[in-house]
Amino acid sequence: MVVQKFGGTSVADPAAVRRLIEIVRAAHTGDGKGPVVVASAMSGVTDALLAIAAAAGAGKDTEAMSRVAQLRERHQLAARELAPSQRHQLEEALGSSFDELAAVVRALAVLREVSPRTLDVIAAMGELINSRIVAAALIEAGLPAEWVDARRAIVTNDDHTRAVPLMRETRAAMRATLVPIVEAGRVPVLGGFVASTTEGHTTTLGRGGSDYSAALVGAGVDVGEIQIWTDVDGMLTADPRVVKSPRLVSELSFAEAAELAYFGAKVLHPSTILPAVERDIPVRILNSWKPDGAGTVITAAGASNGTALAGLASKRDVTVVDITSSRMLMAYGFLRQVFEVFERFRTAVDVVTTSEVSVSVTVDDRRHLDSIVEALREYGEVCVEPEMALLCAVGDRLRNEPAIAARVVAVLEEVPLRMISQAASRRNITVVLKQADLSHAMERLHEEFFA
Ligand code: ADP
Ligand code: ASP
Ligand code: MG
């Protein structure tokens, strides 16, 4: 039995949903049980919902309402085409969701303020609505599907917009909501990305979070494989938007996949691997346009005869913060003080390097940067450099073969590197460079290791 997650482009329109139906049918008849289907919002819908929230919060209610009408139209069209015989029930469900959305938008336009909690109510709509359409389309195609409200299956804390799942509560919720459906030979369909707190407030798992939902379901229902169906053949050796012709990586270890995802391989949400590791469930990334492809399989063991590097990842819009102080020399406690500032402003730090009198860190989330800089000034001179990028070369073999790391740095000899870091896992070597140099550096490395 497997869990199958379909991303935005794999549910973008009726043609995509028809491909989904055949993929689900093959799994259902093949295994005689399941699958559990996790559906994303249609592509572009989460962005549109967030734009609606922003417009409403800025008092631009006409703009917000016209976008709501467009979304209503797009979903109604898909519903009519995919499930004509369930038209009435579906239209009622969609109607009440969109009426609720419109009511929230009107209220925001008056209040002119969007709290993270309200933002979650709005952002969750895309998955909640689309999963209903997907369930109806599967039923229409003769499969025993049953829609499940994801908020009754995944329980999180109240850190709205990037809520953290509570594992024990989530497993209990899944035992009550998903397991009986699977045991009855039916196919549960739920929206990804969406969850709720123990008090029943809607939360979301952060952008790209449907992958994470699928992994949580996989662990909660004890499946044999977690499948991530997307619009590329699998994990590629580099981001196809940065490197011209990346290759498919057929096998990866959990650790390699986690590093690639964390350092920018958008095809997989970085938290997806955790539930899979805990229960040792393989994760497979597959292309919904080419269902016969083998994709990338991610397991504890990884590749049997791996290449020198497994892949490259990159992140743009990274900011480097340097703190320089002679007080750091031979002192203790200095780093604690510095990191406490980042903790206070709930900002994650990605890469860290230190010298005798300075520490450099990179951050992704600039929301609290001004306050952070001000607080850091108490400890030393602070310098901020925006428009930087992070390039990360990942591979299990880096652990035992120091020559590979040397080759990475040597290939980049003509590119000015701002920071270089190799963490204790020694599974990745990360460099920080100017964003303008990123694509050249990626191409050079890709050519060296994967051409
Ligand atoms: P979905 O909507 O299916 O979740 P995403 O857009 O979140 O899909 O992720 C798939 C996209 O991730 C690909 O279309 C590709 O542009 C991008 N991507 C970035 N890095 C990689 C990589 N190393 N391998 C594969 N895809 C990558
Ligand atoms: N729809 C959500 C997003 O766009 C979640 C997902 O697709 O994974 O971020
Ligand atoms: Mg995604």
Image (cartoon, grey):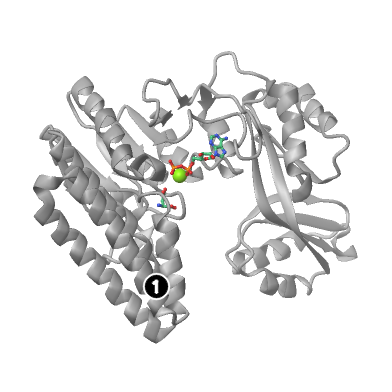
Tell how many labels: 1
Measured along the vertical axis of the image, is residue 325 above or below residue 231?
A: below
Q: Nearer the viewer, residue 4 or 305?
A: 4
Residue found 38% across the figure and 86% down from its top: 110
Is residue 83 in sight in this rendering?
yes
In the image, is 246 to the left or to the right of 429?
A: left
In percent of width and height, residue 382 lies at 81, 67
In percent of width and height, residue 102 lies at 29, 73
In the image, is 240 to the left or to the right of 26?
A: right
Measured along the vertical axis of the image, is residue 347 above or below residue 269?
A: below
Measured along the vertical axis of the image, is residue 11 above or below residue 226?
A: below
Placement of the C terminus among the 4 image quadrants: top right
Measured along the vertical axis of the image, is residue 191 above or below residue 35?
A: below
In percent of width and height, residue 79 lies at 21, 50
Q: Nearer the viewer, residue 304 or 141?
A: 141
Placement of the N terminus among the 4 image quadrants: top left
Circle 1: residue type: Ala
In percent of width and height, residue 94 lies at 21, 60
Residue found 83% across the figure and 69% down from its top: 380
Residue 429 position by quadrant: top right
Q: Find numbered disc 1 in the image and state the secondary structure of the residue it sits on.
A: helix
Is residue 178 in sight in this rendering?
no
Residue 393 position by quadrant: top right
Say if disc 1 is inside 8 Å of ligand 2: no
Label 1: which residue? 64
Residue found 85% across the figure and 40% down from its top: 415
